[in-house]
Image (spheres, grey):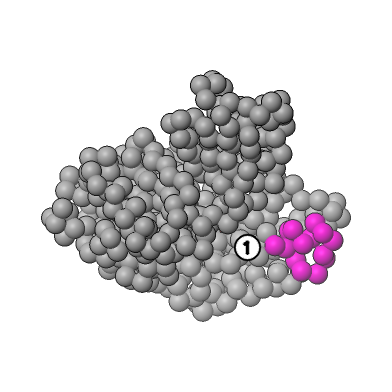
């Protein structure tokens, strides 16, 4: 039993759809020989579609009544052209045309009401932004049928029950599991491939929600957990998870294996491989995840498992950087030994809804620094000044400052703890390049060491660390050398 999720570029054109159909056909045949056969497919919207939908809704809210009409045409042509190229059966094409018409009419109605109201709520945006998957999934199901693969379109609003945190809803598994199983298991048992919309769900009351941008990966993992899949495959346009961004490090290579923990760290620090929540359903159910390339399906990709092989532990696996960050520092002698400063600091930060990506405190307790996205600094600093008004007046706290244009460079590898000298290597690498390290943090899991550097030096830092650990060599080879 396999759950296969296809991303936006995997369904980005007629050629890509045809390629997906070949891959699914092969997997269905392979599965037929296993004791528990079956394939379920989860799809993203065609690439570019979600952005276009969001853009149209936002412009409508500002009173633009023409852009969404243009967008509607673009969307119609985009989807019809795939259908036109890959589906010969007239009845199938007509049925699909009716689905497209209904979705696009819904899109137009929604945008015109948004324009009338002059306001776009997150709840309204979820309905609009989820339309892309609701166009792509019926199309993919029809393409599969046209290639002789029994398939049926299933809308995830019928399957995934979520809370009502619009824009980043979480699944309620105790409701999702029975509902999804009731709908999907009979299909799979009859040899029919369900083709499910990624990204979306609905509240208990049936109000549409989305799981957050890039959330189709998460949908794939949720469906994988529901069906107790043997593997959850994330089909994308690169050969799995790389040691670094190949645009930054030309000799970056793809990793055979990573642990859930490592991939979660990488996703958190901006490596655009997997939606960060994807690993949760996989871990909880101990289901391996595999990241594969639709355009090079014979490449083994990256397998993500609970524990990586003994030999590959204790090494650096990958390096990522995330720019557009701001380093906030709260400093002062009066903080030494005073309990509660950290709690008040992060209480104030939480109050303004800022996301903290990294924290570091020196053991002398004279300062706490932490990193937030650039855009949050404008609200975080005043919130801290207000919280510590008295301490600032009394000079217990000398300064609350922020440094713009910094980047976090995260060096990831499980159990780096077991291997002395890794930190030394990291600092030697950046030191050799004359890169100033502004702050450092290491999680207690020791699956990551993060450095804050000036954004303009982030790429150099990634390259230098990649070189010093020879990440261009296969993991097995590097481990032997240690
Ligand atoms: N289509 C959605 C997005 O672009 C979900 C996804 O692609 O995973 O965010
Ligand atoms: Mg995507």
317 magenta-colored: no
Indicate the secondary structure of the residue bearing disc 1. Answer: helix
Residue occupying the point 60% across, 73% down: 78
Which residue is more in the foreground, 72 or 40?
72
Closer to us: 239 or 116: 239
Q: Residue furthest left?
A: 480
Question: Residue 280: horizontal and vertical position, in percent?
Answer: 41, 40
Q: Is residue 161 above or below residue 96?
A: above
Residue occupying the point 54% across, 45% down = 371
**Residue 153 position within the rendered picture, expressed as x and y whole percent measured from the top left:** 51, 56
Count of marks placed on residues: 1
Whether the residue under disc 1 has CB within 8 Å of ligand 1 = yes
Q: Is residue 62 magenta?
A: yes
Q: Is residue 316 left or right of residue 374?
A: left
Region rendered in magenta = 55-69
Q: Position of residue 177 (x, y in %)?
A: 45, 36
Q: Residue furthest right?
A: 116
- The answer to whether residue 76 of the structure is visible from this angle is yes
In the displayed orientation, state which residue is furthest to the bottom.
Answer: 85
Q: Main secondary structure of the magenta part?
A: helix
How would you rate the neighbour count of disc 1 (Cα within 10 Å): few for under 14, some for 14-19, many for 20 or more?
Answer: some
Q: Is residue 356 visible?
A: no
Q: Is residue 157 left or right of residue 118?
A: left
Instruction: Report which residue position mark 1 lands on.
Output: 51
Where is residue 290 shown, x and y percent of the image?
Answer: 33, 54
């Amino acid at each position: 039993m396999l759950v296969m999720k296809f991303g936006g570029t995997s369904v980005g054109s007629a050629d890509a759809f045809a390629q997906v159909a070949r891959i699914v056909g092969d997997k269905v045949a392979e599965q037929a020989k296993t004791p528990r056969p079956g394939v379920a497919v989860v799809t993203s919207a065609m690439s570019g579609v979600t952005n276009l939908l969001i853009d149209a809704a936002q412009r409508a809210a500002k009173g633009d009544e023409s852009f969404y009409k243009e967008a509607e045409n673009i969307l119609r042509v985009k989807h019809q052209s795939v259908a036109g190229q890959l589906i010969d059966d007239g009845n199938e094409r007509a049925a699909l045309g009716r689905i497209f018409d209904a979705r696009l009419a819904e899109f137009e109605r929604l945008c015109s009401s948004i324009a009338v109201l002059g306001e776009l709520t997150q709840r309204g945006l979820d309905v609009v932004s989820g339309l892309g998957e609701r166009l792509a999934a019926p199309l993919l199901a029809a393409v599969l049928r046209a290639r002789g693969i029994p398939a049926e379109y299933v809308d995830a609003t019928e399957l995934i029950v979520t809370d009502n945190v619009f824009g980043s809803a979480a699944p309620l598994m105790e409701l999702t599991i029975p509902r999804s199983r009731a709908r999907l298991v009979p299909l799979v048992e009859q040899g029919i491939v369900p083709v499910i919309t990624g990204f979306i769900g609905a509240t208990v009351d049936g109000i549409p929600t989305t799981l957050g941008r890039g959330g189709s990966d998460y949908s794939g993992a949720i469906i994988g957990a529901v069906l107790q899949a043997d593997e959850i495959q994330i089909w994308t346009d690169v050969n799995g998870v790389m040691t670094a961004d190949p645009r930054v490090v030309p000799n970056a290579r793809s990793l055979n294996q990573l642990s859930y923990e490592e991939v979660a760290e990488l996703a958190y620090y901006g490596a655009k491989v997997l939606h960060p929540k994807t690993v949760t359903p996989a871990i909880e159910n101990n289901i391996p995840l595999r990241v594969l390339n639709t355009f090079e399906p014979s490449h083994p990709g990256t397998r993500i498992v609970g524990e990586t092989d003994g030999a590959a532990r204790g090494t650096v696996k990958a390096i990522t950087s995330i720019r557009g960050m701001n380093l906030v520092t709260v400093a002062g002698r009066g903080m030494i030994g005073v309990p509660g400063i950290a709690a008040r600091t992060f209480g104030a930060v939480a109050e303004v809804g800022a996301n903290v990506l990294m924290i570091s405190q020196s053991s002398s307790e004279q300062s706490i620094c932490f990193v937030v996205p650039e855009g949050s600094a404008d609200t975080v600093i005043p919130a801290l000044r207000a919280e510590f008004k008295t301490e600032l007046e009394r000079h217990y706290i000398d300064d609350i400052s922020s440094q713009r244009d910094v980047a976090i460079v995260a060096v990831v590898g499980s159990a780096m703890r077991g291997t002395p000298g890794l930190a030394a290597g990291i600092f030697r690498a950046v030191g050799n390049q004359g890169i100033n390290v502004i702050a450092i943090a290491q999680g207690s899991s020791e699956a990551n060491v993060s450095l804050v550097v000036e954004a303009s030096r982030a790429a150099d830092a990634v390259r230098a660390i990649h070189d010093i650990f020879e990440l261009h060599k296969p993991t097995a080879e590097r481990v032997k050398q240690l």
